[in-house]
Amino acid sequence: MELDLPLIWAGIIGLAVILYVVLDGFDLGCGILFPFAKEERDRDQMMNSVAPFWDGNETWLILGGGGLWVAFPAAYAIIMPALYVPVIVMLLALIFRGVAFEFRWVAKPNHQAWDLAFWLGSTVAAFAQGVILGGMLHGIRTEDNAFAGGAFDWLSPFAIMCGLGVVAGYALLGATWLHMRVSGPLERRSADWARPLLLAMLAFILVVSVWTPLQYDRIAERWFSWPNLLYLSPVPVLTVVLAAVIWVGLDRRNAAAPFLGSVGLFILSFAGLAISNFPYLVPPDITIWDAAAAPASQMFLLVAVVILLPVVLGYTVFVYYTFRGRIGPGEGYH
Amino acid sequence: MELDPLILARVQFAFTISFHIIFPAFTIGLSAWIATLLGISLWTGDPHYRDLAQFWTKIFAVSFAMGVVSGIVLTYQFGTNWSAFSLAAGNVIGPLIGLEVLTAFFLEASFLGIMLFGRDRVSPQLHFASAVLVAIGTAISAFWILSANSWMQYPAGHEVRDGIAYPVDWWQIIFSPTFHWRFVHMLIAAYITTGFVVLAVGARFWLKGKHLIEAETMMKMALGILVVLTPVQAVVGDFHGLNTLEHQPAKIAGMEAHWDGNHPAPLVLFAIPDEEAEMNRFELAIPKLGSLILKHDLNATFPGLKQFAPEDRPPVLPIFISFRVMVGIGLVMIALSVIGAFKWWRGHLFRPGWLMQIFAWTWPLGFIAVLAGWITTEIGRQPWVATGLMRTEDALSPVGGVAVLVSLVLFVLVYAVIFVSGGYYINRLLEKGPVRHIPKEDLRPTRPMAAAKDAGRIALSAGE
């Protein structure tokens, strides 16, 4: 049987993106929530809870971007110039929040600037990622397989809303992560943060679910034609179930349920967007097969991925296992 | 005014990659140094080595963070500014970058967590193993990125159809003809760079009369490796030069400001190359020595710049100067290493005096040499982005000059803030010096035994 390499690669990149979104999502989320924790001790605790992981988490972003280049160079060469502004903004924001992890500790007691850098960097990076998502969903104007639009084509109310939605979503991941991983007063407060964020995230999911089929016929047809409607109906039902799991989990002070429920919400949202847009990599023109790299290149790296990705996942789990357990106030690894 | 996106994109890449390379050049060697210290500490049980490792780990953490965040920018910049190149070379170079992520980045980033924060959570053996894995990860990363760069310098193992490169032989692509020497040259450069930083910090402590045991350990270990590596680097550099002459003769002609290929080349010590007039002004040169160095024969000839069409020549002045800066610093580094090692052998290294004062200021040498070397090889590759395959001017994305200018200005501003702050904090960590660590078996005070053990240990160590 002939392997459908572009399809496999779309799956791998999808996996890298969802792992990135969930993993860096919770540590960016902790940054977004920084101003809500007024005490220095709470902020230390928030940062300590993600300090051993953030670097590995962010590496999935490189695998996502690098993987896109490897497997779909034509899409990479269209998306990056088209989303130039939000991509650059995201990178600059990630620089600030990344160095803040180290600088903040060394700068103490004069670390207020790096508190700000951590918060702003995390928030702006999340917002820019949402705008990138919105820009891609909206579609990119191409001619002869090259970007043929202007520098601000991506800018639309829809993209801005996606940006806000991702900020809320990451903050939800961050709050539920803290709920699972810290002890003391911060645990209680993280539950208070999580509830409105869950509502915001649900509102965002609802708006996207209504907005995109109304604006794009291909998406409406995908979801509302028979029998797709039947096959796809578990997606909204599961969304409601997961929201309930998070809410009840917070009420009952269950450690893991709210976080796992939030992760589930992200996976479902991602699946929903994939269903809406498949097989387009750059809507409305370029499919995964149009943008695919040479089969020899896709095959070469596929072999490497099959061997190496399980190893990477293995030691990622090991690192999370090593730093398991709750962090109390005033505790840390420094 | 019309903004030229090409020159702006080139400046942006030059700026962001120059900023980035400073950190890998340091952290490749630093991780190996920390792993070595942890290994010795494990072997001998001497706490000084462990404290020294901990001290350098803090500096490593700050440097590595700056390297990571400035590196992500580069992965994306291929697409934002150089999408035509990404498309033309993506089939070939893309997988090399992909392999770098899979074999190196994850390894470094994951075990970095254990290296930085795991000391009290894992066994000393596993902590040591994590440091070794991080060190290996940084070297693997250098392997892949230099493989990709070498392919751009001299592409091999591919075929071109409709302006797009397709892979034919992966072995030839990964181990392209200029790769071997370039990789060895860069790896040694990274270890030398770290060596001089460690030497300089040791000398600083020693001159201040602080942390004397650690200072002597640092200086001895640094000099021990430098006295071996700096001369080896000169030999490797020579082979790298011969290899460049074979595969990129125009680059060598530019580096040597060698115009006329019909006569044996002199070694030009000083000149202002004039590209309009195709000659050197104010030249000070030793006849035939250039041919001796590059052909190992006084009377041999090699191509001069005039043998290449003007549009195929690299810019001469910048690489002529940067190459001389690199070699000049290299010679200074050899001299300092040999003198230091000699004094150590004679037993009067640790005396106040001019040598100690100089050592305290040697920390920037490696960085400047690495930057000068990369400027030489990258500008020397011009006018090609991938030699013979695509010219730099054809590699650009369809983006406007304003977008590239604004992002360039932002990168300069942000990097300036990061660089100044990072330098300030690293200096602050250096001023503080190594501190004695009291190990904790468990961070969670909910386990009373652990807290009791800690209290006991603190009481004991106070009585020491």
Image (cartoon, grey):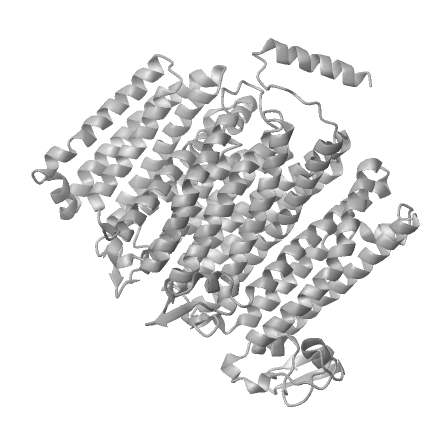
Most extreme residue toward the bottom, as rendered?
Answer: B262
Task: Give the left or right position of residue A137, taking residue B368 as reference.
Answer: left
Residue B385 visible to an observer of this rendering: yes
Residue B12 visible to an observer of this rendering: no
Check the picture and name the quadrant holding the C terminus of chain B.
top right
The residue sitting at 27% across, 35% down in the picture is: A269
Seen from the viewer's position, the closer of residues B393 and A17 is A17
Seen from the viewer's position, the closer of residues A10 and B169 is B169
Q: In the rendered image, which quarter is residue B54 located in? A: top right
The residue sitting at 77% across, 59% down in the picture is: B333
Does A271 appear above or below B332? above
Task: Give the left or right position of residue B335, taking residue A287 as reference.
Answer: right
Does B167 appear above or below A248? below
Task: Give the left or right position of residue B206, taking residue B148 as reference.
Answer: right
Label count reads 0
Q: Position of residue B24 (x, y in %)?
A: 60, 50
Seen from the viewer's position, the closer of residues A270 and B158 is B158
Does A147 appear above or below A243? below
Q: Position of residue B250 (x, y in %)?
A: 57, 78
Check the picture and name the quadrant holding the N terminus of chain B.
bottom left
Most extreme residue toward the left, as rendered?
Answer: A226
The residue sitting at 29% across, 55% down in the picture is: A153
Seen from the viewer's position, the closer of residues B12 and B434 is B434
Q: Position of residue B13 (x, y in %)?
A: 51, 60
The residue sitting at 77% across, 15% down in the picture is: B460
